[in-house]
Image: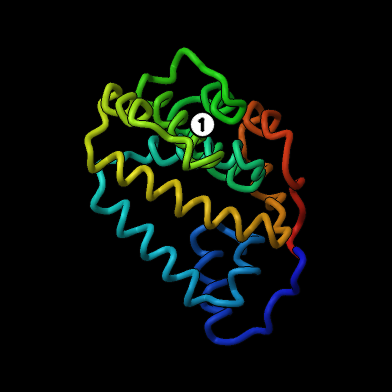
Amino acid sequence: MFIPTPQETPGVTAMYENNAKAQGFVMNFARAWAWRPDVFEGFLALRTQLAAQSTLSKRDQAIMVVAMASTLGDAYCSLAWGKTLAQETSAQAAAAVVKGATDASLTQRDRALAQWTRKITQDPNSTTQSDVDQLRGAGFGEKEIFEATVFVAFRLAFSTVNDALGITPDEKLAATVPAPVREAVDYGRQPAAAP
């Protein structure tokens, strides 16, 4: 990480404790976001609010994050959410999304969502009515299309902060990711132990 970890304060300690409780250890990204625990909590609250009122499934969310992260070259989110996507589909399907490829188990909905996500990540001004129509053809409603777009933008912001500050994926996380997914993530920063 390109910046040091902040000094311990009650807010920093609480953030580390919450992260360790949820993940089993304090993740590397938490050490950077601990500079502003209030901003991190606000981000989580907004993401939770979006997901709570949405019909987008955990599988949909994992497809979006993996497609966004792999397009961006973000190894951290590719590994973390690649693991989630493998649990929702299979390790082979998750690895295919990481690579931007197809897998027989990926549905039309999965493929359309991944394609939309990659386009938003690469160049949001390049989207067309035809792209939105493809989402509709895959079964997405208008509200879901909006929500998917907002979700990708949120995740892109989160990844941008992590990547710009040189945050590396956690070795402990990488060790739990299925081998096909780990092997597909051949970009970005390599996993490292906590500082």
Disc 1 designates what residue? 86
Amino acid at pointer 1: Ala
Quadrant of the snapshot with the C terminus: bottom right
Q: In this view, does 70 lie above or below 49?
A: above
Q: Which residue is depicted at the point 27% across and 40% down?
A: 144
Q: Where is residue 141 in the image (x, y as percent from the top left)?
A: 22, 35
Q: Which residue lies furthest to the bottom in this view?
A: 9
Q: Residues within 10 Å of mark 1 (few under 14, many from 20)?
A: many
160 vs 125, nearest the viewer:
125
Q: Is mark 1 on a helix, strand or loop?
A: helix
Q: Residue furthest top?
A: 104
133 vs 88, nearest the viewer:
133
Quadrant of the snapshot with the N terminus: bottom right
* 169 horizontally vs 36: left or right: right
> Which image quadrant is residue 27 in?
bottom right
Q: Which residue is depicted at the point 38% across and 36% down?
A: 60
Q: Which residue is depicted at the point 52% across and 17% down?
A: 102
> Which image quadrant is residue 176 in?
top right
* 148 horizontally vs 122: left or right: left
56 vs 124, nearest the viewer:
124
Rendering colour mode: rainbow
Q: Position of residue 42 (x, y in %)?
A: 42, 70
